[in-house]
Image (tube, rainbow, N blue to C red):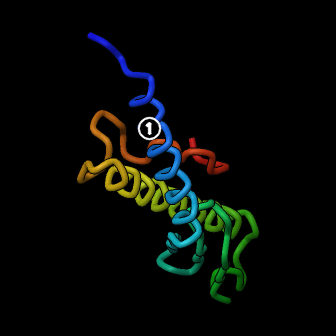
Amino acid sequence: MQINPFDILKNAQKIQEQMGSFQEKLGGISVTGSAGGGMVEIDMNGRMEILGVRILPEAADGKDMEMLQDLVAAAFTSAAEKIKEALNREMGSLMGMAGGIPGMPPGFPGFGAPGLS
């Protein structure tokens, strides 16, 4: 079987263009993670940047700080999981595979996005 280097180059350029488009879409993906029945919420985009944090007063009122810190960490984890799911769907649609990439676990690492593992 003969491999045409021009076909490889053409495919590589197409993939590079698609990845550039995907990187642009990351900023447009937005999710909200919550914990404690909505007492703590964190908004995050696809670049794993925190866009907002909301803490209801009753979450801190008379509570110990350790519990509040746990709620903030849980809300962040919730948002990060939602981002991973969105990235998996987005990469699957980018590659023409409905439901994500076969063989990849839900929430596979985002390409170059900090904090994704």
Q: Mark 1: which amino acid?
A: Lys
Judge whether 7 appears above or below 64 on screen: above
Work out which residue is located at the far left of the displayed protein and give it. Answer: 98
Task: Say which residue appears at 37% left-offset and 46% top-offset.
Answer: 106
Judge whether 44 appears above or below 90 on screen: below
Judge whether 56 appears above or below 40 on screen: below
Label 1 sits on a secondary structure element that is helix
Task: Say which residue appears at 57% left-offset and 41% top-offset.
Answer: 117
Work out which residue is located at the far right of the displayed protein and give it. Answer: 65
Number of numbered tags placed on the structure image: 1
State which quadrant residue 63 falls in. Answer: bottom right
Task: Say which residue appears at 64% left-offset and 81% top-offset.
Answer: 59
Judge whether 53 appears above or below 108 on screen: below
- Side of 86 where 20 appears, left or right: right
Task: Say which residue appears at 56% left-offset and 54% top-offset.
Answer: 20
Residue 98 location in percent, x, y? 23, 53
